[in-house]
């Protein structure tokens, strides 16, 4: 969505937006799909100047379970 706001609808296709969407995560307790709530850059956990650690907060709408996942992301993708 932020890409559409930044570049306008005429420059971004639906396929591009769908490709950037995170893959669905199943709840460990009940198996339902968890909702992605936020991403947070953790600067202290970065291992190099070119990558940063990112924590993603997830929550299950069915049972209320919460989960965090951690991934490495290139610094060049942060502004997008």
Image (cartoon, rainbow, N blue to C red):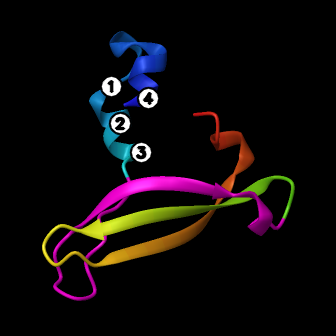
For marks 2 and 4, the one nearer the N-term is 4
Residue tagged by mark 2? 17
For marks 1 and 4, the one nearer the N-term is 4
In the rendered image, the vertical position of residue 76 relative to residue 51, given as above or below: above
Which of these two is toward me, 45 or 78? Answer: 45
Q: Is residue 49 left or right of residue 30?
A: right
Q: Distance of mark 4 from mark 3, alpha carbons?
A: 11 Å
- Residue range highlighted in magenta: 22-47
User: Residue 24's image quarter?
Assistant: bottom left
The answer to whether marks 1 and 4 mark residues whose Cβ atoms lie closer than 8 Å is no
Q: Nearer the viewer, mark 4 or mark 3?
A: 4
Q: Distance of mark 2 from mark 1, alpha carbons?
A: 7 Å
Q: Tell me if mark 4 has few (under 14), some (14-19) or many (20+) residues whose alpha carbon lies within 10 angstroms of its own.
A: few
The answer to whether residue 40 is magenta is: yes
Q: Which structural element holds mark 2? A: helix
Residue tagged by mark 3? 20
């Amino acid at each position: 969505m932020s890409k559409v706001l930044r570049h306008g609808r005429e420059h971004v296709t639906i396929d591009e937006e769908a490709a950037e969407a995170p893959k669905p995560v199943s709840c460990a307790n009940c198996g339902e799909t968890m909702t992605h709530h936020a991403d947070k850059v953790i600067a202290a956990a970065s291992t190099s100047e070119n990558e940063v650690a990112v924590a993603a907060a997830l929550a299950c709408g069915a049972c209320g379970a919460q989960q965090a996942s951690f991934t490495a992301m290139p610094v060049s993708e942060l502004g997008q």
